Amino acid sequence: MSRRREIVKNGDVFLVPLLDGRYAVGQVLDFMMPNAPSCAFYGRTIERALPGEVTIARNDIISAVSTTRDLFDAGRWQVVDNQVVQLEQARWPNEQCRSRRWVGAVTQGSGIVENFLNAFHRLAPWDIYKDPNYFDEMLISEAVKPAKLVFKTH
């Protein structure tokens, strides 16, 4: 039996499962690009949340990227609320490509986003990809990069 495609809307707050059983928090900013919602991700984790229990704040945003929707559709990224979008539109990922019908837009796979969130929360190495600074490019600013990270042993 095939799973019904999840309907995801601007402002949806959702949970991303982490390796230790906690959840990272994300919010859909915009769903204009086909199959690639732009999302903000927050630096705090939670144990579990019921609808209406997650609070988000702009100053907790660590990343804003466009990603694939497959983990929404699979039910892995579960929507728990809908709130006012916290990040101003000028800072949304790929916003500079909107007027060109998304030509030149960059999208991160949802699996890469999960790897990034696990690394950010020190549950996996920060340097798992060929470019050891790959995750740095996903940060909303260098200021939010954790002081202590896990790195692969060489």
Image: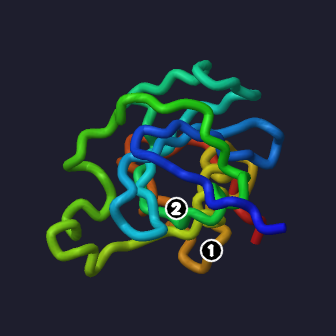
Disc nearer the start of the sequence (1/2): 1
Residue drawn 36% across and 67% down? 33
Q: Specify the amino acid type for callout 1.
A: Tyr
Q: Specify the amino acid type for callout 2.
A: Phe
Give the left or right position of residue 147, taking residue 102 as reference. Answer: right
CA gap, disc 1 and disc 2? 9 Å
Check the image and name the residue furthest to the left.
Answer: 99
Residue 64 point in image, percent of width and height? 41, 51
Between 38 and 1, the residue placed more toward the observer is 1
Between 130 and 32, the residue placed more toward the observer is 32
Residue occupied by mark 2? 135
* Number of numbered labels in the structure image: 2
Residue drawn 27% across and 74% down? 102
Give the left or right position of residue 90, taking residue 22 as reference. Answer: left
Residue 60 point in image, percent of width and height? 45, 31
Residue 52 point in image, percent of width and height? 58, 21
Between 13 and 22, the residue placed more toward the observer is 13
Q: Residues within 10 Å of mark 2 (few under 14, many from 20)?
A: many
Determine which quarter of the picture holds residue 151: bottom right
Give the left or right position of residue 78, taking residue 132 as reference. Answer: right
Quick check: marks 1 and 2 in contact, CB under 8 Å? yes
Residue occupied by mark 1? 129
Point out which mark residue 5 bears: none
Residue drawn 36% across and 30% down? 84
Q: Can you say which quadrant of the picture contains the C terminus?
A: bottom right
Determine which quarter of the picture holds residue 47: top right
Element marked by disc 1: loop
Q: Can you say which quadrant of the picture contains the N terminus?
A: bottom right
Residue 76 point in image, percent of width and height? 72, 52
Protein image colouring: rainbow
Q: In the image, is residue 139 above or below residue 79?
A: below
